[in-house]
Image (cartoon, rainbow, N blue to C red):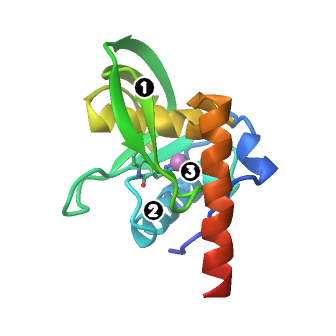
């Protein structure tokens, strides 16, 4: 297993659209294990393959306090969504940055597991936020894309400041 390095904004590779997974082999299972190791090491609740510069439709999530409820969605597609919620989001590709984003309250996704088996997964609340946030990464989309230009530029300036402080510490 290995901890992979996470791309940070404004890395243009974060804008890549991921391709569907077509080969469900031991390499894929190894990659999923590495994604979990990377996500847990970074104290994240989710991670999309895009963030580790692998442009295939793989995402992992674990919203549990105990870090023992791993969820893997491969080739996930939203088949239904309902309602709306505002949630303060963060992203491992934007260290130290948080902003309110409005998304669907509930999502129903069709996905495959690491063996290529189809399943349907329904999520609500914070878990539904994570599913939508990770699916966006696979489309090259990031949470600040939802903010108004004014709010986005304010936050990105703050991110720069945070980076400079981290670099001089
Ligand atoms: O660790 C993460 N926390 C988080 C908090 C609120 C909404 C979404 C997230 S996902 C994020 C990890 C990440 O960047 N995944 O792409
Ligand atoms: Ni993210």
Query: Which class describes the residues within 10 Å of circle 3: few (<14), some (14-19), or many (20+)?
Result: few
Label annotation for residue 164: none
Residue holding disc 3? 25
The residue identified by callout 1 is 102
Alpha-carbon span between mark 1 and mark 2: 24 Å
Label 1 sits on a secondary structure element that is strand
Residue 142 visible to the viewer: no
Circle 2: element type: helix
Ligand 1 within 8 Å of the CB at mark 2: yes
Q: What residue is disc 2 on?
A: 39
Q: Measure the alpha-carbon separation of dots 1 and 3.
A: 37 Å
- Disc with the residue nearer the chain's start (1 vs 2): 2
- Distance between mark 3 and mark 2 Cα atoms: 21 Å
Q: Answer with left or right where residue 5 lies relative to residue 109.
A: right
Residue 148, percent from left and from top:
61, 28
Residue at far bottom of view = 169
Residues 27 and 44: in front is: 44
Q: Residue 91 appears at what percent x and percent y?
A: 51, 52
Of badges 1 and 2, the one in the foreground is 1
């Amino acid at each position: 297993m290995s901890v992979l390095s996470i791309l940070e904004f404004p890395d243009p590779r974060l804008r890549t659209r991921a391709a569907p997974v077509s080969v469900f082999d031991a390499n894929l299972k190894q990659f999923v294990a590495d994604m979990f190791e990377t996500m847990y090491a970074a104290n994240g609740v989710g991670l999309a393959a895009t963030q580790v510069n692998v442009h295939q439709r793989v995402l992992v999530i674990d919203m549990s306090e105990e870090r023992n409820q791993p969820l893997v969605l491969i080739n996930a597609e939203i088949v239904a969504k309902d309602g709306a919620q505002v949630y303060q989001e963060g992203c491992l590709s934007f260290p130290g940055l948080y902003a309110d984003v409005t998304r669907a309250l509930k999502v129903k996704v069709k996905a495959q597991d690491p063996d290529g088996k189809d399943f349907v997964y329904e999520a609500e609340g914070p878990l539904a936020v994570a599913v939508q946030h990770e699916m966006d990464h696979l489309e090259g989309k990031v949470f600040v894309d939802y903010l108004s230009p004014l709010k986005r530029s304010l936050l990105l300036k703050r991110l720069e400041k945070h980076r400079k402080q981290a670099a001089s510490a």
